[in-house]
Structures are given as structure tokens and as C-alpha cells.
Image (cartoon, helix red, strand yellow):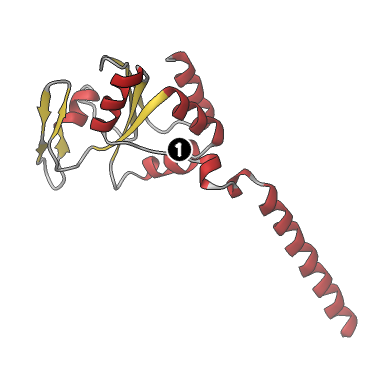
Amino acid sequence: MKLNYSYLLIGVLVLASAFTVKSIITPSNLSNNEKKIQKWHSVEEAVSLAKTDQKKILIDVYTDWCRWCKVMDQKTFSEAEVSKYLSENYHLAKFNAEQKEELSFNGKKYTFKLNGKRGYHEFAADILNGQLAYPSLVIFDSNLNKIEVVRGFKSPEELMKILKENT
């Protein structure tokens, strides 16, 4: 009986050390500064920053209830290459398509419109060409001309391809 517990103990130790080594070397264990986007701005802040350095603006249009929006935050935006590329080439803004606060953009005021139980923000409807689908990314040049609307979840590889085509 003593021998069986020894084998069991050795097996547990081997498995524990394997998981420990794996967790040390995986990308998911990088610090926040190494893998995540440093700062998401409000739309207004991103517009103001773009005027100073002529970088493009990427607006992530999301809702609080959108599962794929959360997956994109966790899987795509947190990937090191994507995060670095976005931070270097774009001013990044998050916009909740159901927010209640008024927004001014490019000389126009936008408000929340009640529609059923939730409603939507006019700004989201405008920049998404009336197709409220989440997540959606909207790319603008520094003069606030819309370049592209990217709908749906994108893997890091898919997003990098799209971003490089627009830079």
C-alpha cells in the first residue's frame, strides 16, 4: 500500500510541475503592459488626438450584453502583435452602442433612441450605416472620413490583415 501512495505522489508532482512550467512560458501569462492595449479613449478623446498627429481612428462599437464583443477583447485585442500594431498606428476608442450620453462628432450631435427594451445610440447607427451588429469596428482617417466598417468577431490574424490593408 505504501508503494501505491508513492507512485500517486510522484504522479501528482510530475503533473503539478508540468502545469507550472507551462504557465510560466505561455503568452497568456504576460503582464498587462506586454499584451494589452494601453489605453482605450472616448470617441471625443480619439478625435482630439488624431488632430495632433494625423493617426487614424479605430472605434470599437460594442454593447454590454454582446458575448462576442467580450471574446474579441479577450482573444484579439489582448494579443501582443495586435495590441502593439493598434497602439502604434491608431487612436483607439470604445463606444457602447446603447449609451445614454449625448455625443458630438464631426459637427453633429447624436443621442440615445429608445427602441423596445433597450434602444440604440444614433451615433452607432450612423457610423454602422444603420446595421447595428456587434462587435463592429469602424476605421476613420484623421479627418473623420470613414474608411471601413468591419463587422463581427475577428481573430488576431484576420484583424491584422484588415488593419494592414488600411494603414
Tell which of 33 and 94 is nearer to you: 33
Residue 156: percent from the left, percent from the top?
51, 31
Q: Relative to residue 119, is residue 159 drawn left or right?
A: right
Q: Relative to residue 127, is residue 74 drawn left or right?
A: right
Residue 1: quarter of image: bottom right
Tell which of 120 and 108 is nearer to you: 108
Kindly give the residue lying farthest to the front in the view shown: 52
Q: Residues within 10 Å of mark 1 (few under 14, many from 20)?
A: many
The residue at the point 49 percent across, 33 percent down is: 83
Residue 97: percent from the left, percent from the top?
23, 37
Q: Relative to residue 29, is residue 55 drawn left or right?
A: left
Q: Judging from the image, what secondary structure is the residue with disc 1 in? A: loop
Q: Relative to residue 79, is residue 167 drawn left or right?
A: left
Q: In the rendered view, tell whether residue 161 sits above or below residue 114.
A: above
What is the three-letter code of the residue carrying label 1? Ile
Q: In the rendered view, tell whether residue 154 sits above or below residue 14.
A: above
Residue 94: quarter of image: top left
Kindly give the residue lying farthest to the right in the view shown: 3
The residue at the point 49 percent across, 17 percent down is: 164
The residue at the point 86 percent across, 73 percent down is: 7
Kindly give the residue lying farthest to the bottom in the view shown: 1
Residue corresponding to mark 1:
37
Residue 140: percent from the left, percent from the top?
31, 19
Residue 148: percent from the left, percent from the top?
33, 17
